[in-house]
Amino acid sequence: MLKLNGRPFIVAVMSLKELSSALTMYVATSRDPINGKHEIISEQENNDALKHCRALRESCIILGANITRIAVDRMIVRLEPGPVSIRDLNKLIDDITGRLEDEFFSINLLVLEQTTQTYFGSDGGLFGPDVSANFPALTEDIAEAGNCLALSRHTAAVFHLMRVMEVGVQRLGDLLHISLPSTKNWQNILDEVNKAIKALPPKERLTKQYAESAAHLYNVKLGWRNEVMHPKQTYTEEEAVNVFNACRAFMRDLAGLVSETAS
């Protein structure tokens, strides 16, 4: 998939518009209104056309509009030796316009909503640097969960978050020195976690941190809307965002615990 913002499209369209406008002006100011198309444009007009062509070429490369780029290259080669006639310029511009229209009509564009575009294209840092540092193997799933949210693939996002939680829950179990249920039933997991936390010295700072992690784990369970860790059949946008936020809060707390116990 090609990721880009709207600027190359704007540059391409504006560059082509500038070329067309310049052509119209050349014909209008021709000294010979009858045979003006055979008139040679000035050196400055030629340089201006070259400038717009080069800007258009860069946009074509970014957009992957290779057929149009070939036509632009042909025009650049034609202009570089020196000024051309208005007629030749018109043919070159018509060729580029037709090709660009054909290529743009064959491209499907997905526009990200303003409210979700921050989820897209992350390198896995959506859960924060501590999570990335302590759980580097989860980088891809965290990034893909964000991409799925941005692209309105809400159920798919939760499936990626399930993979994140599988690792996170087992890591919490390791820290508490308990073996968590293999059935992955949320309530059974929470019961075992809370039982282990209650056995810790109540006044120790780590005990409080474990309790906070357990609270976030409970929020994950609520957002999951299923008794087991496997996602339910479908999730709405609101449900998936709630799961994402709950998982992020849990993993951030867990990353802090991992760092704390390692020091």
Image (cartoon, rainbow, N blue to C red):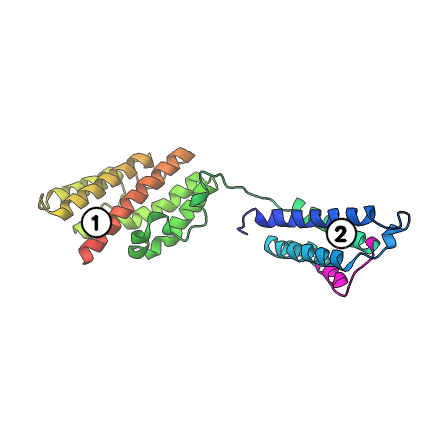
Residue 156 % position (x, y): 43, 42
Q: Is residue 232 visible?
A: no
Give the number of marks: 2
Residue 230 figure quarter: top left
Image position of 51 (left or right of 240):
right
Q: Residue at x 8, y 46 (%)?
A: 201
Image position of 69 (left or right of 226):
right
Q: Mark 1–mark 2 contact, CB under 8 Å?
A: no
Image position of 75 (left or right of 249):
right
Q: Label 1, on which residue?
A: 173
When the figure is inspected, residue 92 is found, relative to residue 190, above or below; the finding is below
Queried whether the magenta region covers residue 81, the answer comes back as yes
Q: Which mark is residue 93?
A: 2
Few, some or many residues within 10 Å of mark 2 (<14, 14–19, 20+): many
Residue 186 figure quarter: top left
Residue extending farthest to the right is 34
Q: Tell me the SS state at disc 2.
A: helix
When the figure is inspected, residue 118 is found, relative to residue 227, above or below; the finding is below
Residue 192 % position (x, y): 18, 42
Q: Residue at x 21, y 49 (%)?
A: 173
Q: Which residues are magenta?
A: 73-86
Q: Which residue type does callout 2 highlight? A: Ile
Queried whether the magenta region covers residue 210, the answer comes back as no
Q: Which residue type does callout 1 highlight? A: Gly
Of 178 and 43, nearer the camera is 43
Image position of 262 (left or right of 109):
left
Q: Say whether disc 1 or disc 2 marks the residue closer to the N-terminus.
A: 2
Residue 237 figure quarter: top left
Q: Is residue 190 visible?
A: yes
